[in-house]
Amino acid sequence: MASLDKMGAVLATKVLCDNIVVAEDVVVTLPDVEFITAEVKALGTFNVPTPLTNPLEPAITAVGIDKGLFSMLGLSSKTFEFRFVQNVLNTSGDTEVQGCKAFIKGIPTKIPGGSVEPGASWSGDVTISATRYQLYVDGIEKILIDKLKNICKVDGVDYAKEMKSLL
């Protein structure tokens, strides 16, 4: 049985908004992809996942009230790129780094307030209502959810393709 590489710590992050670097070394929260289920009667009930999803809500924990923070805010659609590098211990015992990128298109849903305290850094969460989420791991697309184009692709399989072809 083959062993798997061991994924280590995230070493760095970078956030771009509309192709401009707006934050570095911040916490980035990728959206959970939660599928809407349909109830089927089968010896009671059984919930079957569909290619439809609940809201996709990524977030960036911004540190500091600065130009980068304000360029992420507003009521218009923005394109975000989250870059992060993770450490990998491969099966031969060598370590390497692996790049990951998440592309998010959506609208920020709030202006963070945060708390202001002498001697402490300000931080606040910029949350996004995403219409598109695309994740690449080591250059390979792993997830593509596009709510406006009816795409629900996971590891190369488009689960909404058949539904789309019948419309």
Image (spheres, rainbow, N blue to C red):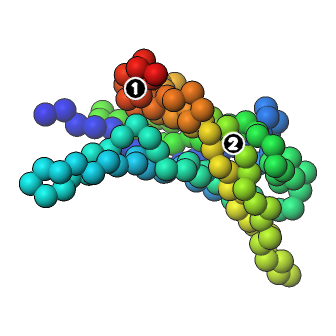
Point 44% across, 41% down: residue: 52
Q: Residues within 10 Å of mark 1 (few under 14, many from 20)?
A: few
Relative side of 110 to 2, left or right: right
Mark 1 falls on what kind of element? helix
Q: Is residue 134 visible?
A: no
**Whether residue 125 is situated above or below residue 119 in the rendered picture:** above
**Residue farthest to the left, as pictured:** 43
Of residue 61 and residue 145, the one placed in the foreground of this image is 145
**Whether residue 160 is situated above or below residue 87 in the rendered picture:** above
Q: Quadrant of the N terminus?
A: top left
Quarter of the figure with residue 2? top left
Percent across and percent down for residue 130 are 63, 44
Which kind of residue does numbered mark 1 sit on? Met
Which kind of residue does numbered mark 2 sit on? Gly
Instruction: Name the residue beneath numbered marker 1.
Output: 163
Instruction: Name the residue beneath numbered marker 2.
Output: 106
